[in-house]
Image (spheres, rainbow, N blue to C red):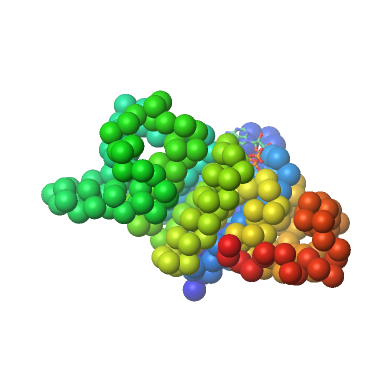
Amino acid sequence: MSIIEYKNICMAYGEKTIIENFNLSIEKGEFVTIIGSSGCGKTTILKMVNGLVEPVSGEVLVEGNSTRQADLTMLRRNIGYAIQGSVLFPHMTVEKNIAYVPNLLNKKDKKRTEQAVTKWMNIVGLEDSLRGRYPAELSGGQQQRVGIARALAASPDILLMDEPFGAVDEITRGSLQEEIARIHRETGITILFVTHDIGEALKLGTKVLVMDAGSIQQFAPPHEILHAPATEYVKKLVEKERRRCHLPEEKLGDCEYSGAV
Ligand SMILES: Nc1ncnc2c1ncn2[C@@H]1O[C@H](COP(=O)(O)OP(=O)(O)OP(=O)(O)O)[C@@H](O)[C@H]1O
Ligand SMILES: [Mg+2]
């Protein structure tokens, strides 16, 4: 069974139609990277999963249940959401931010929550000494890690990530990519990950969703995107990446894309 299914989705903001007849099935455990032109509806697609946006028509099924009928609080407990920029609670320390959902889930067991915080800080590469700091006392990259740790600390089945590594330097970005790939391998979590970087999309995704103007250009594993681009739009994206990698066409398959870092 698909863990997320978009069925005949149409979406408009006011008069403006953004998405029409959008259909997509995502299997459990998939790492779906989403790439496409600015304003084509990527964030909107993501927000439909946790009910932050409701489609005008059609429905989104999460683990078989329509988000229209879902208890949104319950739904969101099972879905981590990490977005670019800091959306941390400014008046809470790193520890309190990460502990927020675990605290809700095991109110009485403080020790368990504390252990969960330690575990996730460790996984995303945050030093323990940062526990007592407030978001304003952290660098952008550290804030992003806290955001990811907080999203993961609830042990969700689904993780939505909207350009999560946008504001960090190349090296930090590389290590965050490795961490998220490892988390995916080790937990079997289903990830939807929006990026503007085709290299990142191909490197991390077990499947890549390429969108343009509210419609699907291609939804396929990285090697298929590279070797059998379905549309001109995808072809152009791939061409750009090939130039970046300095690779001739026949060599592209040897680039580091395998669905995991
Ligand atoms: N709350 C809103 N009210 C009106 N229009 C909106 C709203 N949210 C998004 N839009 C419009 O819907 C379209 C899709 O927006 P969305 O945020 O999904 O795009 P995106 O693909 O994530 O873009 P980007 O790559 O720039 O983040 C855009 O044209 C945007 O201006
Ligand atoms: Mg967006």
Q: In the drawing, does residue 30 fall left or right of residue 183?
A: right
Q: Position of residue 123 (x, y in %)?
A: 39, 54
Is 5 or 229 nearer to us in this picture?
A: 229
Specify the quadrant of the image occupied by residue 142.
Answer: top left
Q: Position of residue 89 (x, y in %)?
A: 36, 32
Is 56 or 197 nearer to us in this picture?
A: 197
Is 68 or 217 nearer to us in this picture?
A: 217
Q: In the drawing, does residue 55 fall left or right of residue 78?
A: right
The residue that appears at 84% across and 70% down in the rendered structure is 250
Q: Does residue 57 appear in the picture of this structure?
A: no
For residue 74, above or below residue 190? above
Q: Does residue 254 appear in the picture of this structure?
A: yes
The residue that appears at 32% across and 26% down in the rendered structure is 91
The residue that appears at 54% across and 44% down in the rendered structure is 172
In this figure, what is the number of numbered marks? 0
For residue 261, above or below residue 240? below
Quarter of the figure that contains the C terminus: bottom right
Check the image and name the residue furthest to the left: 108
Q: Position of residue 260 (x, y in %)?
A: 58, 65
Where is ligand 2, by quadrant?
top right
